[in-house]
Amino acid sequence: MRFLLKLILLLILALPLVVAGLIYLVLDSAPSIDRAAEITPANIARAKRILDQNDPRKLTPGVRRTIFVSQNDLDLAANYLARQYAAGGARIQLQRGIVKIGASLKLPVRSLPIYLNLDATLAETGALPHIESLRLGKLPMPASLAYWLIARTVAFALADVDMRYFRSVVKKVAFAPSRAALTYEWQANLPAKLRTVLLPAREQNRLRLYQERLAAVTRALKANDVSLTELLAPLFALAAERSTDDDAVAENRSAILLLTLYVNGQGIEKFVPEAKNWPRPAQHRVLLNERDDFPKHFIVSAALAAKAGAPLADAVGVYKELADARGGSGFSFNDIAADRAGTRFGEYAGAPAPVKKTSCLEPPTCRSSCLRLSLTGASAASIHRPIKRCWPRSSGASRLCRSTNKFCRSFTCRDKSWRDRR
């Protein structure tokens, strides 16, 4: 009995040392991979081609398709995701039959720089790849333990997602030195399953609240043409109210997403079938500086930046203008300015920050005489004057007015002949 008590006491004393040793081996104070995340219009063009080739409207259930992705694009996407969502970096190297993955992920500890550095090797099997090796920091992990950790992590992060279904959709993953190939089988209910990943139930409930507020606001407006600010202000006021008890960034993103659909004439029911029973907003033409294209550029860029980061939003905006230059309405610096202003808006709306209940935000105003882009919908004469009126904001949009004005000043035209040029 005395021996058993000594053993239990020893285990109790040794357990903290074992845990401390594991933490020392697994975690690092610096990332092993620290790379810039850059996306170009050419990357957007290649991504668009892949989406066009796999348009679900052209697929029938049971058909199999193979998606080919180059190593450069796969490496770029992995590094961008790690940079955007984990403040780290990633690297992917393809070889015949295997892929080597390295990643550095910053843990969400504000006061200390703590990183999880990992290296993994996956090998193709004729179906889904299997783990050949995994190292967390300095600690090698057995494959069985790695599978268990991955399963627990996925179950925690995607609790509402049926992962077995998605594994049945993917039929084969193959690796070559220059590209990876993914073969999948299209199924009729795949869009609904994807919707549970992109718009989980909690997000759909949040969107309904903003839909109700937008419906009330638009039904009260009498004029056919409305300023974007008349819609932004009440939706972000609701975000500020809800951010006291909920995630401010999630509230900002929901408000921007719903407004993006409205400004572009798309109904939320296209993505959330249950929204057919939600209150419907009255239709208005949304303007910025008496133009209806500025709001579209602004709010789409804001939605992209809030959810996926500023580099992606900027690259999409430039890609669109290059496409217009080749066969559309022509390249427009005014449109680029609206894109960049929206990107700044979304960047701050999607950035975590402490909630400040008493602060307010001036509507961001572009003081450039050639761009004349004002969220207030004010006349050109008022653009050069400070705007006194404040409107509520949620915490994620801190410093927006100052940052947007700084951006606009950097685009001030030297030559007035460029004014309103398209």
Image (spheres, rainbow, N blue to C red):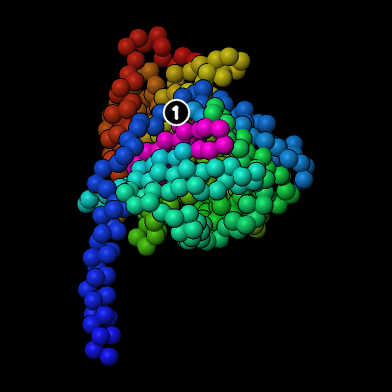
Q: Is residue 84 magenta?
A: yes
Magenta residue span: 73-99
Is residue 59 visible from the viewing direction of this image? Answer: yes
Q: Which residue occupies the foreground of this view, 96 or 93?
A: 96
x and y percentages locating residue 283 in the rendered image = 60, 42
The crowding category of the residue bearing disc 1, from other C-alpha atoms within 10 Å (few below 14, some 14 to 19, many at least 20), is: some
Image position of 48 with respect to 272: above or below: above
The amino acid sitting under disc 1 is Ile
* Residue under label 1: 39
Q: Residue furthest bottom?
A: 1
Q: Which residue is pictured at 54% across the width and 27% down the height?
A: 178
User: How many marks on residues?
Assistant: 1
Q: Is residue 153 magenta?
A: no
x and y percentages locating residue 187 in the rendered image = 72, 48
Q: Which residue is pictured at 56% across the width and 60% down the height?
A: 160
Image position of 181 with respect to 115: above or below: above
Left or right placement of residue 148 versus residue 36 in this view: right
State which quarter of the image contains the N terminus.
bottom left
Image position of 60 with respect to 333: above or below: below
Q: Which residue occupies the foreground of this view, 417 or 7?
A: 7
Is residue 116 visible from the viewing direction of this image? Answer: no
x and y percentages locating residue 189 in the rendered image = 71, 52
Quarter residue 415 falls in: top left
Left or right placement of residue 197 versus residue 112 in this view: right
Secondary structure found at label 1: loop
Image position of 120 with respect to 54: above or below: below
x and y percentages locating residue 362 in the rendered image = 31, 40
Q: Which residue is pictured at 56% across the width and 52% down the height?
A: 197
Q: Which residue is pictured at 50% across the width and 38% down the height?
A: 99
Q: Residue furthest front?
A: 3
